[in-house]
Amino acid sequence: MDELRSVPPKMELRAGELAEQLLPELESYHRVYNPLFKRREQREQSMQYLQGLLSAIPNKSVECMVLHMAGDDPNAIRATQQFIGQGAWADEEILEQHWQEVEKDLGDVQGVIILDGSDFPKQGGESVGVKRQWCGQLGKRANCQAGVFLGYASPKGYTLLHRRLYLPKEWLCEDAYADRRQKCGVPVDVTFKTKPELGLEMLRQVAQTDTLSFRWLTCDEAFGRDSKFLEQAAQYVYYFAEVPHDTRVWQQRPATAVPAWSGRGRKPTQERLVAGSPAPHTVVDLAATLSASAWSRQTVKEGSQGPIVADFACLQVVAVRDDLPGPDLRLVFRRQLETGELKCYLSNEAADTPLQTFVWLSGMRWPLETCFEEGKQEIGLGDYQTRSWTGWHHHMTLCLLAHFLLVRLQLKLQDKAPALTLPQAVLLLQSILPKPKFDAALALEIVQYRQRRNHFAYQSHRKKRIIHSEVSL
């Protein structure tokens, strides 16, 4: 292994091959989705948007993409804004086709679905779902939108799979937000759902289409703490969920019984713990009781800076559900060597599952984290400026397609460039995508457009302030 890694990765691609291989791949990939865009204009705009997401421009907002690709053309900007923000094209059908394409290239019976959230800092309060809340990207409470995403990983690669916008309860339940809901086009049938509920809906949708092979679901403790979510997810998948340290379990199943009837009132029908049954323990307390021999040192995966190694232990436990014994589960501990940090996981996989399987799964959240990083840095996942419900989901759908196109390019080129990363695939694609000549004339057009836009915004804000001051008098 060390001898192999001392040899630099090969690169046998030649400049003349790029256009011959990559442009036809982009065109054939887009043709897969063409029938799902009902109008010619939508098909053209979807291709232009994909190219914009993959282009080397400062950011991937509609204005910036159109300005750099078509110059100061207000009509083109409005048309693209309408395509994203209000366009009548079916996200759900496109997503289902996307899952079929993922199955063709990445599908595996041991595939892992990864559930996590990603947040997007936003200024102002007019964008759909925006609120001061915890923002993972900034590591603090801030004004942001919160998305819930599914990713998919297999030995062949990884990509983004599904997306939902989280709407805080205030947005759906308070009259003060009624005007904003209407302006943002939030459908009247949308009801408040927690992030685990949104995750479950996406998982159910993927499972019920029966187009993508998978066995596992992984998630962090924001989802693993929700026992109802885990119970319902278990209908579709084996889960490996990180849980908080205060999660309670039994080491042996306690006795339960229906209490004897006292002769008065209704006869008891629900089981209760038998008197004297042991109390459940928190998972962190159980970890503290383990002997040194219960732990084993395992290699999680080969990281970019070398192997990732941690200590692991595993127990058979009984879950606590409404203070009663629930399903039999596996409790897995992962302890970092350098810091001693302890992570705890619960899984509904069979009791004879080897520890090495759980070791592998403990390192399987990184693909989705990498997707977020690649999406935000390479394809403008967070660069959108649309404020509408439809616009958020349309933008995210096209970002999912853009990311998977790059994954397909990696697979197509793997014989000649086996170590090709996704950012490197973007760079190669950008080298052959048609691009406008960025000269002084185009720079002046962009400056002129932005000055005109800033002036109109100034006039609008000034008019509102004057009206407000007159009313207050």
Image (cartoon, rainbow, N blue to C red):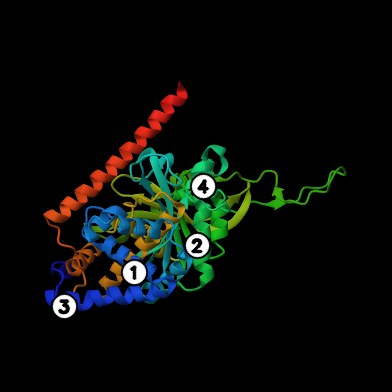
Q: Nearer the viewer, residue 148 or 242?
A: 148
- Crowdedness of circle 2 by 10 Å Cα count: few (<14), some, many (20+)? many
Q: Earlier in the sequence, mark 3 or mark 2?
A: 3
Q: Nearer the viewer, mark 4 or mark 2?
A: 4
Horizontal placement of 1 versus 328: left or right?
A: left
Mark 4 vs 1: CB contact within 8 A: no
Which percent across, then down, holds residue 399?
A: 35, 61
Crowding near pointer 4: few (<14 within 10 Å), some, many (20+)? few
Q: For residue 17, which numbered disc appears in the image?
A: 3
What residue sits right under mark 2 in the picture? 203
CA distance for labels 4 and 2: 29 Å
Inter-mark Cα distance, 4 to 1: 29 Å
Disc 1 versus disc 2: nearer the observer: 1
Q: Secondary structure at mark 4?
A: helix
Q: CA distance from mark 3 to mark 2?
A: 40 Å
Q: Quadrant of the N terminus?
A: bottom left
Q: Which mark is residue 182?
A: 4
> Image quadrant for the C terminus?
top left
CB under 8 Å between discs 4 and 2: no
Horizontal placement of 179 versus 452: left or right?
A: right
Direction from residue 437 to residue 244 in the image, left or right: right
Q: Identify residue type, mark 2.
A: Leu
State the residue position of label 1.
Answer: 44
The mark closer to the camera, 3 or 2, is 3
Label 3, residues with CA under 10 Å away: few <14, some 14-19, many ≥20: few
Q: Quadrant of residue 279?
A: top right
Where residue 431 appears, as percent x and y from the top left, is: 17, 67
